[in-house]
Image (spheres, helix red, strand yellow):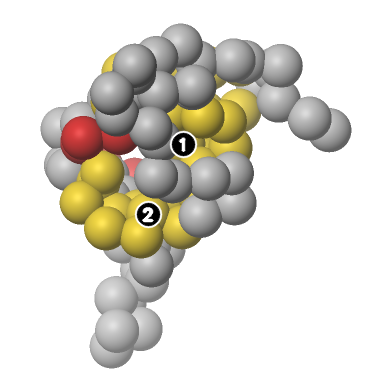
Amino acid sequence: MALNIRPIADRVVIQPAPAEEKTASGLYIPDTAKEKPQRGTVVAVGEGKKDEPITVKVGDEVLYGKYAGTEITYDGSEYLIMRESDIYAIL
């Protein structure tokens, strides 16, 4: 199913990766202690600004700031809308 959100200017829509369920040693993490993921997949991109083209593309896996973006729910799925400048790296 294609996402029907079209961000404007230098904004991108990211689907966050799921939060970790277990620690490296095998302990399960309760919902109240789970960290917000700081990585996700780009699902939509804007057209960029006049002098600044967008460098990420749909399908890129990216790292972003812990408090970056605005959380939205669309068709039952969670997404983040943020400026491209809030993205730190493409994996």
Disc 1 is placed on an element classified as strand
- On screen, residue 21 versus residue 33, left or right, reads right
* Side of 5 relative to 4 (left or right): left
The alpha-carbon separation of the residues under discs 2 and 1 comes to: 9 Å
Give neighbour class at mark 1: few <14, some 14-19, many 20+ (Cα, 10 Å).
many
- Report the quarter where the N terminus lies: top right
User: Which residue is found at the position 38% from the left and 32% from the top?
Assistant: 53
The amino acid pointed to by label 1 is Ile
**Residue beneath label 2, please?**
62
Check contact, mark 2 vs mark 1: CB within 8 A: yes
Residue 11 seen in render: no
Residue 37, image x and y in percent?
31, 50
Q: Identify the residue shown where x is 17% and y is 43%.
A: 65
Q: Toward the viewer: 82 or 23?
A: 82
Q: Earlier in the sequence, mark 2 or mark 1?
A: 1
Residue at point 28%, 23% (across, down) = 51
The residue sitting at the right extreme is 1
